[in-house]
Image (cartoon, rainbow, N blue to C red):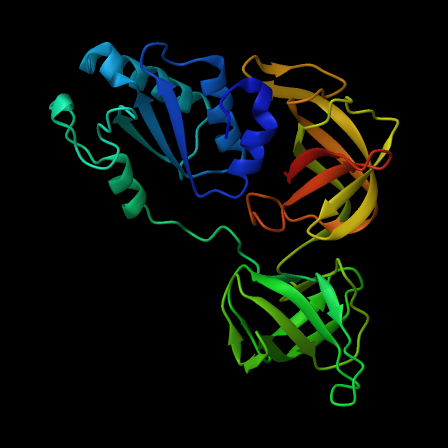
Amino acid sequence: TPGHEEYTRNMITGASNSDVAIILVDARRGKLPQTERHFLINHLLLTNHIIVAVNKMDLVDYSEEVFLDIKKTIEELAIEYPDANRTIHFVPISALKGDNVIEPSLNTSWYNEKSVLDILENIEVNNTFNTVSLNIQNVIRPKTEQYHDFRGYAATVRGGDLSVGDAVEVVASSQKSTIKSIYLAGESFQTAREESAVIVELENDINVTRGDFLIVGSDKYVKQKNIEAQLCWMDHTALSERSTYLLQQGTSRVRCKLKVSGKKLMENHRNETDTLAINDIGTVSVKTSKEIIGTSYATDKNLGRFIIIDEKTNNTAGVGFIL
């Protein structure tokens, strides 16, 4: 993503689907406000693996002292935003010359750790989707002679594997059913692996529409109409507490009202505010017209995130992470 602070929304979008972040630091300039912004965003989005690539080492004569000074400032920043599950790797590189990008460099004989590629290939990524779920994209009703009564639900399997016989609950209505059959690319399977795009049939005919969530296990999530969230504002029109917005989780949409709770997080740390402008990140209270999945982002990255849409312009106005 672009590094400049004007592109915070791009950073948020990229980091929200990432397991590892590489933060580039110019060896000549060291830590900048945008460096802290990058670090804070990855902290908020619970990115557990950070690679700090100190770039352009060729322009500082591959100085170990310059590298260690930058490393120290980033380590001090990490203390300010603690996370017991986070690991940070520091690598001196030259993207132009290729030093320590793929192979260890003779120009940094004082550096005895892995290259960027070696680190990436050896990082163990843990699943941060803890609940098996299906967010319905489409209802399949062929209405042909062969499939006269067929009703299938198209979705991508998130959070783990899905099997025939699994008990599921429809979040919107709390109705329960069981997976009767699973189809993938026209073939029937007993189990669908995580991230598979499938069509499922249910044992009983209950009301399921586009946007609904099917959750395996009714004790794996919470529903509520009032949530607290971290929100990154992405629209040129500032957040208005008088306006009504749409909150979208997956393909499900409900109307909502937003109220800034008074904490804005950025390079100036916590500033009092009653609104959020473009690229601001702050804590908000969200009141929805219907119950939504209120599972925190820390518990489940799939269920705990949403976007805010401006009803008047249909712009994506913000992205949020449930606290």
Figure check: 84 above or below 179: above
Q: Which x, y percent locates residue 189?
A: 53, 80
Figure check: 81 above or below 160: above
Figure check: 319 above or below 57: below
Indicate the quadrant containing the C terminus: top left, top right, bottom left or bottom right. Answer: top right
Specify the farthest residue to the front.
Answer: 96
Count of numbered labels shown in the rendering: 0
123 left or right of 254?
left
Figure check: 160 above or below 166: above
126 left or right of 89?
right
At x 49%, y 18%, the residue is 34
At x 31%, y 22%, the residue is 54
Q: Quadrant of residue 168?
A: bottom right
At x 70%, y 40%, the residue is 307
- The reply to whether residue 124 is in sight is yes
Specify the farthest residue to the bottom.
Answer: 145
At x 87%, y 30%, the residue is 243
Q: Which x, y percent locates residue 49?
A: 38, 38
Residue closest to the eye, 315 or 225: 315
- The reply to whether residue 68 is in sight is no
Q: Which x, y percent locates residue 146?
A: 74, 89
Q: Which x, y percent locates residue 118?
A: 24, 41
81 left or right of 211?
left
